Amino acid sequence: MSRVASAKPYAWPYDGSLAADDVALVLIDMQTDFCGLGGYVAQMGYDVSLTRAPIEPLRGILAAARAAGVRVIHTREGHRPSLADLPDNKRWRSRQAGAGIGDPGPCGRILVRGEPGWDIIPELYPLNTEDVVDKPGKGSFCATDLDLILRSRGIKRIILGGITTDVCVHTTMREANDRGYECLLLEDGCGATDAGNHAAAIKMVHMQHGVFGATATCDAVCAALNALPRVPDASALVRTTMTAGLKSSHAAGEIAGAKPYPFAWRVGECALVMVDWQRDFCDDGGFGASLGNDVTALRRAIPAASRVLAAARKAGMPVIHTLEAHAPDLSDCPPAKKARCPAIGEVVRGGIEGSRVLVAGEPGNALVPELAALEGEVVIRKPGKGAF
């Protein structure tokens, strides 16, 4: 008998053993916009390490589910390009949070279907045989055919993982519970933008002896799934799942001469971040020069930076570029910064092709040609000094 005996507050499922044909794994909104650099969550200023934390635990769950023949369903939150399905209050709220849904961002228009940020991350990307449910809201049942899919396939139980624990995952769990599905929430297979919210969301499930279902760790659920009979191509499915997203990733490496200690990284766990290699800082007539700085020292560093960039690309390491820039109306430029650096937003004598200093989209705000971004590399525009 396969069962998640350590599930809380009761051994799951409640009525006996687990069977592959009546359970589904539902992975909620594991999209770049929610757990990738430059996505919706990052643009709001949250720490994406919290929403990325479930990726590896979910990879193991996904491999075990596929090997056991468990139905896998993925969801994506997003809106039509016309935004016809985007409520006005939702767009207003997102703009107050600093990342307007439908507005341009580093990963395309935020939470818009078909844009790079809207798609599921490579590490957990669906197989061609797996259903993807596109939803315009937080819950996965609202305005979708998820309930029809589950009932048509005889599904009685749902294992839930994804992001965020307290919003889309919890909403879906409550919707499913009201529809009669027995739910199991993956404690470390979910993530939230606030650790306290994540913990509270898990605690809520335990109330009243499992008011919405039960919770368990990914390891415990993997053990139960691995005890089920395996499908004929299980080994190949596991290999595909455990290497997804690593096809172009770099190898492990170490810089032994780094100071004050050697800098080492594991396979696929390092990125090169090129910070503010823009003409405004490196060219005569730019922002730096307008402050009286000697930019020749910066330009002398470009060849070395170019060699590092080329090596990172050759190794398959992700490359992220940043640009310090302000909106054309300078609405994101603090008055104190403008007072300290009055050239910001102005066209200065001898400037770069008549561009306004440190303004997004102007010629001076472009990366220097030697270090320009290639197609597919993330470029993050930031109004301050830090890139987070």
Image (cartoon, helix red, strand yellow):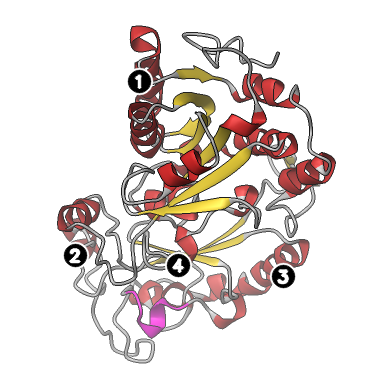
Q: Secondary structure at mark 2?
A: loop
Instruction: From the image, state whether disc 4 or disc 3 is nearer to you.
Output: 4
Residue type, label 1: Ala
Residue 232 located left or right of residue 138: right
For image coordinates 46% across by 23% down, the residue present is 182
Q: Label 2 neighbourhood size at 10 Å, few (<14), some (14-19), many (20+)?
A: few
- Image position of 193 with respect to 205: above or below: below
Q: Nearer the viewer, residue 130 or 347?
A: 130
Q: Find out whether residue 153 is within the magenta segment.
A: no
Q: Amino acid at mark 2?
A: Ser
- Report x, y in % for residue 312: 71, 62
Tell me if residue 269 comes above or below residue 118 in the rendering: above
Could you tell me the amino acid type at mark 3?
Ala
Residue at 37%, 92% in the rendered image = 353
Residue 310 marker: 3
Q: Which residue is mark 1?
A: 200
**How far apart are labels 3 and 2 at the CA level?**
36 Å
The residue wearing badge 4 is 115
User: For residue 331, which numbered disc appears in the image?
Assistant: 2
Helix, strand or loop at mark 4:
loop
From the image, which quarter does the N terminus lie in?
top right
The mark that comes first in sequence, 4 or 1, is 4
Q: Residue at x 44, y 72 (%)?
A: 281
The residue sitting at 57% across, 31% down in the picture is 23
The tally of labels here is: 4
Vertical order, 319 against 50 (above or below) = below
Residue range (magenta): 360-366
Dot 4 amino acid type: Glu
* Of marks 2 and 1, the one in the foreground: 1
Q: CA distance from mark 4 to mark 3?
A: 27 Å
Locate residue 301: give its quadrant. bottom right
Seen from the viewer's position, the closer of residues 28 and 132 is 132
